[in-house]
Image (cartoon, grey):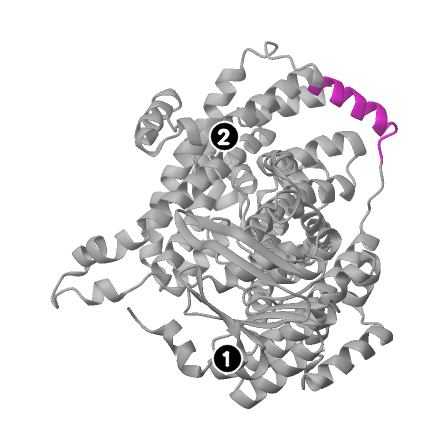
């Protein structure tokens, strides 16, 4: 068939076959003895939340918000400066590398230098967010209309023309995007608790690991309320005030001696064979080869397998979920319920979902696939559902399954694929960190290397992760260009 | 067949149809004429609501699914005749019997060779033939069409409209070509500002009478 639909179908088929292949290769066994009983315990905890068992709760909440707000402040300022230099290839490359490394890995890295400190929390968010902001702001500026700047009187200096004729065009977009990122940062900050920082994730992990599910549930409820109410109390006008408050309460600091810093740079991160006074290239080659065979290849392989399987599950789930909130289907009540479900799944970080699923099912790939698919599937479903609201179907259009298959699905499919391919890179990034939970993706080897104090290995493994991410990003971009997909929504990155 | 009595429609404070009095009997072929914004599409929709199950509907907007093939767009006229699963099977892979029926109709509409092409790759005229094909494939006895041949040249448009009219015992179509209306339909209804200002048999009307409808005030 010479149709637009068949071209999209072709790409879908390739992705689906890869996903199925990944599912066949993936270890999706349930390794806990009684998942049902554990699930019942956890469910019971959610029905009987205990809000008064940890007195450190408010402190944890404070640190979570402090790292998030300070991280976004520093990250957006840095990203803004880099965005001004966006036409330089080196800046684009550097920001691509910086954002390909997950906040959690940055956290592990800074832990080696600055220890368990507020500075580590701030930097773990600020550094990757700087790369993300640089890209998004840079692209905003690139895509904005240059006519106002050109219309200025000749001889206007570059500085004034930027403030008068370039920045005002993109300012609103930047503010909207910044608000969205604050929400992401609160999630990232909470997750940082899993590597020991004193945010809410730390107490969540402790409570769940010790089986105190009522405490854990209470923490999770509070976390949800904080994120969902963010837009109510985190007004743009109040932002400087909040930031000032967090700086007073948790000033970024670390007790670091210059000796420790020098040791980190000159010794810890130097590949082990190079630390001897007389070393040979062959030793370095052996070291790298061993690392490649034993950790990088299996780690990258498992990350790819989990990521592709999760991408397939995400796509299927999104296609099933979007009618729940679409104005083309159902009625007000059903859409209300659909919205609640999607908001819940979107708000809970995939890492947190994976953590709970690992407790129930054991550390196979199953909890990872489930968590990624539920979270990302809800995001893609939300975007697709919102897009269907703009469709103007004919009044005699069919209903039910016929309406879905013939009228709605073909019309939204290009957008659906674009949303999904945009999310692919993020799925891979999240897949890598699931290793911290014991699922054997790249992050598992990175986490082990850090805990064995082999920072040199960790750095090489992180480098492999960066390359994987950049490759996936390139493939996704190539596919989108080939299919001429543009989703036209910049608020999700 | 259709009967409107004191029928008014207001949308966002603007009166679109104003106390319309209208009867259309079985067997009539009616043309709706009038300047844009006169209420032709709204009147057609009001008629459709009176006979939703007997009307073959050919609207202007949202008529076709751009990324699907001509076959599928025509087949969609028959969605209500089959079970959802049967339809789904045909969406994935058209069945021989359905293909034959659609191909036969497409041949009469002169788009048989485009059956495998998606609508977004067709010319405006070919897309209109497809939209009419979808209405015809619904196999209902009343045709309600909104500017069904506006993208075709005069002679092709007339041939296509005659073909479509011959397949329905009753038809109401909004048109802008006055001569086409006089040639093909036996009753003309002229709308202006949401009111019926002309309602007469075509044989009693001349083109000058119709031009009156479009004159600027």
Which numbered tag is attached to residue A333?
none
Give the Cα distance between marks 2 and 1: 96 Å
How far from the left and from the top, in percent, is residue B121?
Answer: 59, 78
Who is closer to the viewer here, B193 or A110?
A: B193
Kind of element beneath mark 2: loop
Q: Quadrant of the N terminus of chain A?
A: bottom right
Answer yes or no: do the residues labelled 2 and 1 have beta carbons within 8 Å?
no
- Give the label, 2 or 1, closer to the camera: 1
Question: Label 1 is found on which chain of the structure?
Answer: B
| Residue highlighted by disc 1 | B204
| Horizontal side of residue A430 vs A390, given as left or right | right
The residue lying at 56 percent from left, 21 percent from top is A222
Q: Indicate whether B39 appears above or below A274.
A: below
Question: Label 2 is found on which chain of the structure?
Answer: A
The quarter holding residue A213 reads: top right
- Give yes or no for residue A41 being in the magenta stretch: yes
Kind of element beneath mark 1: helix
Magenta span of residues: A31-46
How far from the left and from the top, in percent, is residue A26?
Answer: 80, 50
Who is closer to the viewer here, A114 or A66?
A: A66
| Residue highlighted by disc 2 | A115
User: Is residue A332 visible to us here?
Assistant: yes
Whether marks 2 and 1 lie on the same chain = no
Numbered label tally: 2
Who is closer to the viewer here, B129 or A287?
A: B129
- Give yes or no for residue B145 being in the magenta stretch: no
How far from the left and from the top, in percent, is residue B9?
Answer: 48, 51
Residue at the farthest front position: B204
């Amino acid at each position: 068939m010479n149709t637009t639909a068949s071209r999209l179908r072709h790409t879908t088929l390739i992705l689906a076959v890869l996903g199925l292949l990944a599912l066949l290769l993936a270890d999706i066994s349930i390794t806990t003895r009684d998942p049902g009983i554990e699930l019942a315990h956890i469910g019971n905890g959610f029905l009987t939340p205990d809000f008064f068992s940890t007195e450190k709760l408010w402190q944890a909440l404070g640190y979570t918000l402090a790292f998030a707000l300070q991280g976004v402040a520093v990250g957006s300022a840095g990203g803004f400066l880099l965005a001004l230099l966006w036409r330089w290839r080196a800046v684009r490359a550097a920001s691509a590398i910086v954002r390909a490394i997950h906040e959690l890995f940055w956290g592990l890295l800074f832990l080696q230098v600055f220890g368990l400190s507020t500075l580590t929390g701030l930097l773990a968010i600020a550094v990757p967010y700087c790369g993300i902001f640089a890209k998004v702001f840079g692209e905003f500026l690139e895509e904005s209309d240059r006519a106002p700047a050109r219309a200025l009187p000749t001889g206007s200096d570059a500085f004034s023309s930027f403030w008068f004729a370039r920045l005002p065009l993109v300012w609103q977009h930047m503010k909207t995007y910044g608000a969205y990122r604050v929400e992401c940062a609160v999630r990232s900050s909470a997750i940082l608790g899993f590597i020991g920082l004193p945010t809410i994730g730390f107490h969540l992990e402790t409570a769940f690991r010790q089986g105190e599910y009522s405490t854990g549930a209470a923490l999770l409820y509070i976390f949800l309320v904080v994120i969902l109410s963010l837009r109510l109390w985190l007004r743009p006008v109040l932002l400087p005030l909040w930031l000032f408050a967090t700086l007073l309460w948790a000033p970024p600091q670390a007790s670091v001696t210059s000796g420790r810093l020098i040791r980190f740079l000159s010794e810890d991160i130097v590949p082990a064979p190079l630390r001897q006074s007389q070393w040979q290239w062959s030793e370095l080659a052996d070291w790298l080869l061993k690392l490649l065979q034993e950790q990088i290849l299996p780690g990258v392989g498992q990350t790819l397998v989990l990521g592709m399987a999760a991408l397939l599950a995400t796509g299927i789930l999104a296609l099933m979920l979007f009618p729940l909130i679409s104005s083309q289907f159902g009625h007000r009540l059903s859409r209300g319920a659909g919205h609640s479900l999607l908001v819940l799944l979107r708000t809970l970080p995939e890492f947190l979902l994976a953590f709970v699923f690992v407790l129930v099912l054991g550390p196979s790939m199953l909890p990872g696939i489930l968590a990624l698919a539920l979270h990302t599937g809800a995001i893609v479903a939300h975007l697709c559902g919102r897009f269907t609201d703009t469709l103007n179907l004919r009044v005699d259009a069919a209903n039910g399954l016929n309406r879905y298959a013939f009228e709605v699905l073909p019309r939204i499919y290009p957008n659906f694929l674009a949303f999904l391919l945009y999310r692919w890179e993020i799925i891979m990034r999240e897949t890598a960190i699931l290793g911290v939970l014991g699922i054997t993706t790249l992050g598992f080897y990175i986490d082990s290397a850090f805990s064995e104090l082999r920072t040199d290995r960790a750095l090489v493994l992180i480098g492999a992760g960066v390359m994987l991410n950049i490759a996936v990003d390139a493939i996704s971009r190539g596919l989108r260009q080939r299919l001429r997909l543009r989703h036209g929504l910049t608020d999700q990155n | 067949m259709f009967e409107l009595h004191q029928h008014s429609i207001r949308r966002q404070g603007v009166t679109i149809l104003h106390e319309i009095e209208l009867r259309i009997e079985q067997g009539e072929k009616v043309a709706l004429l009038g300047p844009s914004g006169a209420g032709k599409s709204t009147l057609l929709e009001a008629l459709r609501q009176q006979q939703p199950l007997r009307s073959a509907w050919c609207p202007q907007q949202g008529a076709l699914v751009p990324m699907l093939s001509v076959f599928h767009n025509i087949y969609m006229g028959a969605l209500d005749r089959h079970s959802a699963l049967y339809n789904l099977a045909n969406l994935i892979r058209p069945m021989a019997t359905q293909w034959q029926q659609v191909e036969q109709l497409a041949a009469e509409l002169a788009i048989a060779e485009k059956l495998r092409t998606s609508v977004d790759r067709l010319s405006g005229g070919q897309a209109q033939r497809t939209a009419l094909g979808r209405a015809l494939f619904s196999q209902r006895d009343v045709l309600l069409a909104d500017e069904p041949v506006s993208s075709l040249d005069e002679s092709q448009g007339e041939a296509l409209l005659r073909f479509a009219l011959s397949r329905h015992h009753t038809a109401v179509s909004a048109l802008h070509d006055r001569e086409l209306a006089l040639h093909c339909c036996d009753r003309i209804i002229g709308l202006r500002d949401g009111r019926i200002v002309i309602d007469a048999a075509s044989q009693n009307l001349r083109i000058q009478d119709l031009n009156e409808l479009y004159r600027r005030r």
